[in-house]
Amino acid sequence: MKVLFVSAEAAPFAKVGGLADVAGALPKALRAMGHDARLIMPDYRMIEDDPRWSIHSAIERFDVEMNPHWTQPASFREMEFEGMPVGLIGTDRWFTESVSSETLYQPGGMQHLFFCAAVMRAMELLDWIPDVVHLNDWHTGFFPVLMREKAGKVWDDVASVFTIHNLAYQGDFGTDVLDALDLPHRLFNPEGVEAWGRVNFLKAGCVYADRVNTVSENYAHEIQTPEFGVRLDGLMRRLSDEHRLSGILNGIDTGVFNPETDPALPFHFSASSPADKSQVRESLLGELGLPSNPDVPVFGVVSRLSSQKGLDMIVEAAETLFALPIQLIIQGLGEPPIAEALRSLERRFPENFRFIERFDAPLAQRVYGGCDGFLMPSAFEPCGLGQMIAMRYGTVPVVRRTGGLADTVFEGVNGFTFDRQEPMAFVAAVTRAVDAFKSGQTWKRIQHEGMIGDYGWSRSAARYAHLYEAACADRVVGEVLIA
């Protein structure tokens, strides 16, 4: 199949979260299966300024007619990354302001509308029309709307798959969104793109795509409930009833996340030869100025600083955790109140805690590789990649049993889990992990079980290929019914 993978971010070019890791790995896995999968994303300034990439122009300039009163100039540049074609949509505004991960997403929704329209126009000019378009998160939600409401016949046979990476981020705006694309206001209704009085990009993608999926089987069930459905649980139940909603667990790029070869690690190790992990641990503690004590486990967190990720609960429980005792390293950016609370903790507990408030991918790899355990007490977690990366590096996860965490981490087998989103339950799980660490052999068994797990993309990519086939079949059936 010809698969066009459309994403607002992709690793290693421009990354904020797990979406980028998926976008950078899944198309490569599909190509390994023989599919002609291609990635397309915005041409951010941070990509253009990065000397690692060899980029050339495919279409120097073309016009994207957004509506009768607005035509936006665009460009299409391309490169190849590990055998995968990568297309870059540029323009004279928005993306030029994105010079780092912190500035990747500019306020508003117009840039995302333009991106969707420009991708379609570029593919038409290049005469490369896919069999299926794989769209990701709310930024691409209007792509299937354009395919069905505005595009020419060339897109009639193209199927669409829309992946929800996190239902909490929906992209809601006023009805000027419809005017910007010259779309009729009849679409602004509860059966269309309207949700709670606003135009909802994510809902638009769900309503108009042939198939909708999210990034773990458990999360696909959770979002059908009021607790996790973020006011769209009714829509999710409807999609499920129509057999249009599914869950496919993410994988990780095991070539990138590999403790045997990772260039960010000062020493390398594996499941069959784990001894040098202790050297990585000592190096990490020295790098961050923490004292070394082989009897005290070191736990890590690499995360966006938000209550969704359970960082508020870590702050609340920190003093109790340090008394166990443990050492803790947290790296991330996010909500200012949580960041300030973590800075205060570091001042109070300099022997136990380090807070690294910056995006630093190599350091994140050393945190994964050098810590003994990894904390993910998430309020909700659609899939979670951190726990899989941690297990790959022999770092035992402690997680709340929700979303993809419940699909990948199992109590006493490859990690430790808890159910209730409250500090006492979290502390109890960490305590069990500390006891296992002190026991030696139990910890090594759990650690080994995590390291030998299959976290690659091959199995999930095969499931995506089946999903694409189902979406294409839906499109054919739909055309027959319309005829």
Image (spheres, rainbow, N blue to C red):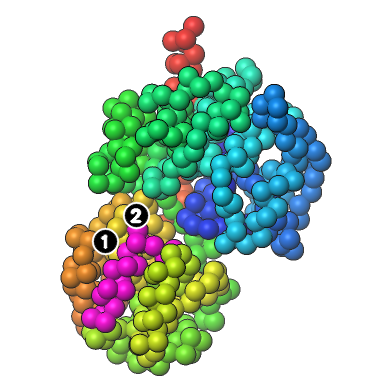
In percent of width and height, residue 105 lies at 57, 52
Q: Label 2 crowding class (10 Å Cα cut-off): few <14, some 14-19, many 20+?
A: many
Where, by quadrant of the figure, is residue 69 drawn? Answer: top right
Q: Is residue 315 magenta?
A: yes
Look at mark 1 in the image and give the residue it sits on: 400
Q: Label 1 crowding class (10 Å Cα cut-off): few <14, some 14-19, many 20+?
A: many
Q: Nearer the viewer, residue 184 or 429?
A: 184
Where, by quadrant of the figure, is residue 115 drawn? Answer: top right
Secondary element at tag 2 = loop
Mark 2–mark 1 Cα distance, whole angstroms, equals 9 Å
In the displayed structure, 276 sits above or below 198; it is below
In percent of width and height, residue 168 lies at 38, 47
In the displayed structure, 246 sits above or below 442; it is above
In percent of width and height, residue 65 lies at 70, 28
Q: Name the residue located 49 percent from the left edge and 51 percent from the top edge.
A: 19
Specify whether residue 156 is in view.
yes
Amino acid type for the residue under numbered disc 1: Arg
> Which residues lie in the magenta part?
304-321
Q: Name the residue located 78 percent from the left edge and 34 percent from the top edge.
A: 62
In the displayed structure, 157 sits above or below 112; it is above
Q: Name the residue located 49 percent from the left edge and 6 percent from the top edge.
A: 483
In the displayed structure, 339 sits above or below 20; it is below
Q: Which mark is residue 381?
A: 2
The reply to whether callout 2 and callout 1 are in contact (CB within 8 Å) is yes
Q: Which mark is residue 7?
A: none
Q: Is residue 58 magenta?
A: no
What is the chief secondary structure element of the magenta stretch? helix
Image side of residue 247 versus residue 55, left or right: left
